Amino acid sequence: MDDTYLKILQMIENGTLSAAEGEKLLDALDAGPAETTPAAPEVVPAEPALPPAGPPRSWQLIWIYPALGGLLLLGAMGGLTAVLVQGGRALGWLACTIPLMLLGTLVAVLAWWSRTARWLHLSVRGKKDKVRLSFPLPLRLTAWVMRFLRPWVPQLRDTAVDEVILALADVDTSDGPLAVEVNDEEDGEEVRVYIG
């Protein structure tokens, strides 16, 4: 294939040219040289293509809420423990406050971990109802659990669910999340799933 064709196709792929402009240039090349050499067509860069719509920014920051909740629980129970110990009150109350402090620490640490984990964002919008869910998706751990349960769960024996989950874990989402959008025009329902 001629270098000119390749350059035009690369410009279309990069978004430098629109598809219509590229088609005009390719048609001009196919027409071949005329008796008089026409002026080279002016290449006007097209507007850059918009990236695929991703989940709303508020979904990307959702990990902050459980982190704040865990830190608040840790702080409240730490303060209560300090008051009880300083007041010389019954140390039996520590049996109530220390597990809650550990729970707050665990929630805060898991929320901090989840900020870099892959998330599953699900949005379902119907005529009357609207549902939005977001949660971190520990894909490798889920695949390990499926593989572990396979001998004891008959429905998992003949499936490769763990392989599908691991394939999802290996999907490159550096350019944006993996997005699946389904719109039902008749019923007015819309489902959006983002992984990334």
Image: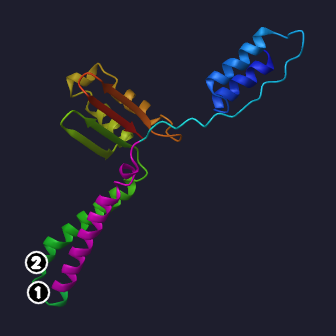
The residue under the point 78% across, 24% down is 41
Provide the residue designation for mark 1. 89
Across and down, in percent, residue 149 comes to 25, 32
Q: CA distance from mark 1 to mark 2?
A: 9 Å
Q: Which residues are magenta?
A: 55-84
143 and 64: which is toward the camera? 64
The question of residue 114 being in magenta is answered with no
* Image-based side of 155 in relation to 122, left or right: left
> Does 16 sit above or below residue 118?
above
16 and 85: which is toward the camera? 16
Q: Quadrant of the C terminus?
A: top left
Magenta part, dominant SS: helix
| Quadrant of the image occupied by residue 137 | top left
Identified by mark 2, the residue type is: Gly
Across and down, in percent, residue 117 comes to 41, 48
Give the number of the disc on residue 92: 2
